[in-house]
Amino acid sequence: MELNCKIAEMELKHAGTLNPGPWVDHSRFVAIACRNIACRCDDLSSDSAYCFGLLHDIGRYAGISSEKHLIDGYRFCAERGWEKAAQICISHAFMIQDIKTSIGKFDISEEDYQFMERFIKNAVYDDYDRLVQLCDALALPTGFCLLEKRFVDVALRYGTPPATVDRWKKILEIKDSFEQKINCSIYTLLPGVMENSFF
Ligand SMILES: [Fe+2]
């Protein structure tokens, strides 16, 4: 079955019934941000970007987990033949292509860990991977927010593992590169970002 917006929406909705939580609305906002930014890029499809945003955390269908949701999402999409979406289920958490830069817990088998380690190292990222990495950091379950606010929010909840600052720098680099491409601030494309960040 070929991936399209309707199917991606349906899969997210279904996954939300299996494991309800704020991750579902977060995914919807990530998808909208991806679509709105991709719309301005000649070489990106806004529908594809929207689908990848909707599905990036789909592995959460399997229940509450940490990094396990990455590989669960990868398998979910790969089984359906959605190769790029499958890659993004893992790549969105690794703006730096090194498994040791993770901020989560590896609640997976040794075998799965080794698979992910190799996968992350060998993956070739394109603008869709980078777009989801960026938009993941722009979307709360309640809407869009300033990247720096989201960074601090995550740091307060999970602490600051060694790779934290390098991860922030990478996201800010990705933001700058998209802004050069679209020739405006990404925040102008995120409805409600002011209200959600400051009020
Ligand atoms: Fe996410």
Image (cartoon, grey):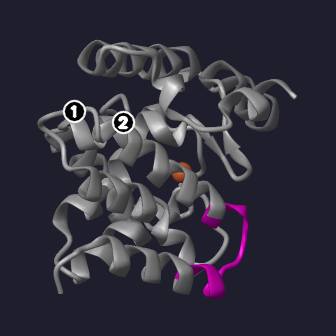
Query: Residue at left 55%, top 14%?
Result: 165
Residue 110 position within the rendered picture, expressed as x and y whole percent measured from the top left: 40, 62
Tag 1 secondary structure: loop
Q: Do the residues labelled 1 and 2 touch (CB within 8 Å)?
A: yes
Q: How crowded is mark 1: few (under 14 residues within 10 Å), some or many (20 or more)?
A: some
Tag 2 secondary structure: helix
193 or 30, which lies in front? Answer: 193
Residue 29 position within the rendered picture, expressed as x and y whole percent measured from the top left: 56, 51
Residue 93 position within the rendered picture, expressed as x and y whole percent measured from the top left: 44, 43
Q: What residue type is labelled 1?
A: Cys
Q: Which residue reaches farthest right?
A: 199
**Could you tell me what secondary structure mostly forms the magenta stretch?**
helix
Q: Which residue is under mark 1?
A: 41
- Relative to residue 119, is residue 146 drawn left or right? right
Residue bounds of the magenta highlight: 15-24
Number of callouts: 2
Q: Residues within 10 Å of mark 2 (few under 14, many from 20)?
A: many
59 or 6, which lies in front? Answer: 6
Q: Which residue is under mark 2?
A: 37
Q: Can residue 114 be seen from the camera position used here? A: no
16 drawn magenta = yes
Q: Does 22 appear above or below 141?
A: below
- Res 150 quadrant in image: top right
- Res 198 quadrant in image: top right
Residue 45 position within the rendered picture, expressed as x and y whole percent measured from the top left: 19, 49
Q: Does 183 appear above or below 17?
A: above
Query: Residue at left 36%, top 36%?
Result: 37
185 drawn magenta = no
